[in-house]
Image (tube, rainbow, N blue to C red):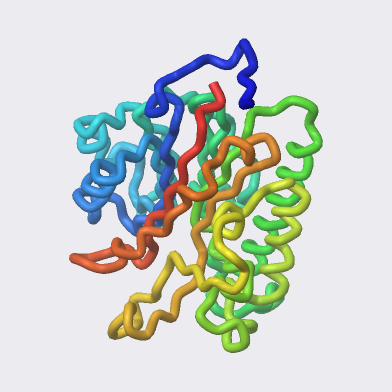
Amino acid sequence: GWYRHPSTPVLPDTMNRLSLATWNINSVRLRIDRVIAFLMREKVDVLCLQEIKCLEDQFPRKAFEAAGYRHIHLSGQKGMHGVAIVSKLPIEALETPGLCRHGHARCAAVTVAGFEVQNLYVPAGADIPDPELNEKFAHKLDFVERMREVYAARAAKRSALPLLVAGDINIAPEENDVWSHRQLLNVVSHTPVETDGLKRVLAEGKFTDIARAKHKPDEKLYTWWSYRAADWRLSNRGRRLDHWWADKRATPLVDIGSYRIHTEERGGDRPSDHVPVTVTVTAAA
């Protein structure tokens, strides 16, 4: 039969399950009503936002607090970048991992319910996939290399909290994470130098890519559709740029089946070009 360790607390199922979302919102002030509606509908406990595009005093804190998200950790920057973590549960801010050589507001880290949650906004890298010709692409590759170093070192630690990494990673690592592998091999976000780099991050950090733990390799998965398409749904030229990863300590606590890409959020009035991605875990503490 099923054995429960005597020290394992017996909690009502709703209490020890934690729902998390990541969403590149492309201006939180512009889309705050959409965000709150989504949180209420999906009963999300913790939300990682990227590209909030505001300073900390401009963040729509009152709207989140009124909806029950009283715990907020922000890293803001004027007009660009910016990440936030908002939570119904108490959070403790952690030192941001040193991933961005320019010191942009691209990372935030907290502890919540026995997990460390890191929220990342990796540089997009502009259009030319050559670090010699394009400083933004060089910055992106440096950011990914720093991720590899930081997460490899963390994975080697004897004791660390279970780690969940979320965010707009701006790389679609697998062949079926883009609408056409062949046509995007030389397009920033799916070039071999980026996808190989990201796979090293996952391997050395001992991460599970939750999307691909649920979905077979031949399934197309997208979280982003360009604004340029006249009809994004019809052309369906998407890329999976937004990710949830669990390290070796967190993976056993993830409900893999709960992973969901909320494609419907790409439609409607003034959407972001990214959609939210949710996952449910069992609280670690």
Quarter of the image for residue 218 reads bottom right
User: Is residue 3 shown left or right of residue 281?
Assistant: right
Q: Residue furthest bottom?
A: 183
Tell me where residue 195 appears, x and y as whole percent.
Answer: 68, 68
Tell me where residue 73 appears, x and y as whole percent.
Answer: 42, 33
Quarter of the image for residue 13 reads top left
Q: Give 225 or 186, whichever is nearer the viewer.
A: 225
Residue at (51, 80) in percent of width and height: 179
User: Is residue 85 shown left or right of residue 122?
Assistant: left
Quarter of the picture containing the C terminus is top right
Q: Residue furthest top?
A: 6
Q: Give 120 or 116, whichever is nearer the viewer.
A: 116
- Up/down of 84 relative to 88, above or below: below
Tell me where residue 104 appears, x and y as whole percent.
Answer: 52, 50
Whether residue 104 appears in this view of the structure is: no
Q: Count up the numbered dots.
A: 0
User: Is residue 204 shown left or right of residue 113?
Assistant: right
Tell me where residue 229 appears, x and y as whole percent.
Answer: 34, 83
Residue at (45, 75) in percent of width and height: 238
Whether residue 46 appears in this view of the structure is: yes
- Up/down of 259 relative to 162, above or below: below
